[in-house]
Amino acid sequence: MTRDFAFSSSVEANFDGLVGPTHNYAGLSFGNVASTSNATAISNPKSAALQGLTKMKALHDMGFVQGVLPPHERPHIKTLRDVFGFTGTDGEILAKAWQANPNFVLASSSASPMWTANAATVSPSGDTADGKVHFTPANLCAMFHRSIEHDVTGRALAATFPDTHHFTHHPALPSVAHLGDEGAANHTRFCDDYGNAGVEFFVFGRYAFQGGHTQPGRYPARQTYEAGSAIARHHRLSDNRVVHAQQNPHLIDAGVFHNDVISVGNANTLFHYQDAFVDTPAVLNELHHKLTGIADFTSIEVPRDRVPLDDVIKSYLFNSQLLRLPENGDMMLVLPTEAEETISVRDYVYDLIGKGNTPIKQVKFFDLRQSMQNGGGPACLRLRVALTKAELAATNPKTLLDNDGFTRLTNWVNRHYRDHLTANDFRDPQLLIEVRTALDKLTQLLNLGPIYDFQRD
C-alpha cells in the first residue's frame, strides 16, 4: 500500500499549547514523578514559552502543519470566587485565598493547559459517520488544577475550528471519577492517508463499572474505559474501527501516568514498551486485524532488557512526537534532550535508526527542560488534528504558525513574560494584571475573540 505523500489530500496538523505566563513548579500532579520531584523550584516562564515556540518553528520549517493553542487565564479568579467562595476585588480574593490556604491559589495558577495532549480527543472526518471532525474537551477530573480547564479549552477549540460545516464540538464528559478523561494523551489513530478511514486506539487505566480487573494501587488510573467508549459513541465511530486497551497498572504505579509516557503511535506505526498494556500480544493482534485493508500496520516493541523502565520514565522516550515526513512518508521521532542524555535510550534510538528496518528513520532532539521538569515532553505539548485540505482551509488561519506568526508570538512572549517566578509571586495582583494584558493581546493576534472569563464578565 503506497501513495504519493507530497500530493496527499490531507495532513496531520500539530497544535502546540503556548506555555502560559504563570508556568511554575507547584508539584500538583500526583503520579507524575517529574512534577512532584521538582516542586518549589524556581521557574522561567519566558524561557519555557520560547523553548516551545522554537520546536514549533523547527517543525514548520520541515514542512509540517503547525498550529498554536492559547494558554489560560491564571490565577483563575473565577475558581477562587465561584468554587472556594472568596469575595471582594480580584486583589482581595487573592489575599483571602492565600491566607486561608496557599494551595487554593497555587491550584488556580497552574499553566498546565500548555500540555494540549490533554486538551481534547479528536476524531478525523474519515472516521466519523457524519464526515465531520469531532472534538471533545477532556474533563481532567483526576486533578483539581486541571479539572478547571475544559470550559476555556472548548472555547479555544471552537475559535480555532469554527466552521460548523466541517467541525463538531462536544462538551466535556461529566466531571466524575467514573468518566475520568485525559484526552489525546490516551488516544491515537492508525491509518494510511490521514483523510481516509482509520482505526482509533483508546487506552485506559481502569474500568469504572466492572469489577474483577487489576488496577493500580499506588497512583490513580486517570482514564476510564467508560470515558473512552462514551467519546467513541459521541464521535459516531464504528465499533469495527475502534480498539480499547488497558494500560499495564504496574507501570502506572511506577509513574507512567498516561499512555503517551509508555507508547506513541501514528499512521501505520505503534512504538511501545514491552509491558505497555494488559495482554500486549492480544492488543496488537486486534490492531492488526482491524487495520487489515486500511494500513500496513507495524509495531515496534522496546524490550525491557534494552531500556530499563526508570530510564523510559526519566527520559520520556515515548512522550515523543512520532511524525510522518511530508516528502516521503518515513517516520521521525522528536525527543527531549533528556532522551539523548540517557545512555540506554540514546543507544537504543540510534541503533533503531541505524538498522533502518522500521518506518522510523530519523530522530530530532529539542531542549524542552522547562516543560520536562514539570512532567511534560514533546508529546504532551501538542494536540494532533488530521485535516483534509478543505478542513485546513476552514481552520482559523491566525492559529496556524508561519514565519510572521512566529515572530509576532516571540515578540509577545518577550514583552509580557517574566523570567523568574516563585510560588509567592501569585499573591501579587500585579501578576494577574500582567497575565490578563498579555492574554487580551494574544486573542487579537490569534483572532480568537473573548474566550477568557475576564473578557466575558
Image: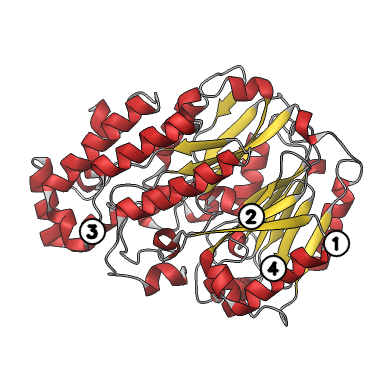
- Please indicate, yes or no, whether residue 121 appears anywhere in the rendered image: no
Q: Amino acid at mark 4?
A: Val
Query: Tag 2: Cα neighbours inside 10 Å, few (<14), some, or many (≥20)?
Result: many
Q: Nearer the viewer, residue 121 or 421?
A: 421
**Is 55 positioned to the left or the right of 286 in the image?**
left
Numbered tag placed on residue 357 in the rendering: 1
Q: Amino acid at mark 2?
A: Tyr
**Is 34 positioned to the left or the right of 86 in the image?**
right
Cβ–Cβ under 8 Å for marks 1 and 3: no
Rendered image quadrant of residue 278: bottom right
Q: Quadrant of the C terminus?
A: top left
x%, y% of residue 330? Answer: 77, 48
x%, y% of residue 282? Answer: 83, 64
Of marks 3 and 4, which one's residue comes earlier in the chain? Answer: 4
How far is the residue under mark 3 from the one under mark 4?
Answer: 35 Å
Of marks 1 and 4, which one's residue comes earlier in the chain? Answer: 4
Query: Tag 1: Cα neighbours inside 10 Å, few (<14), some, or many (≥20)?
Result: few
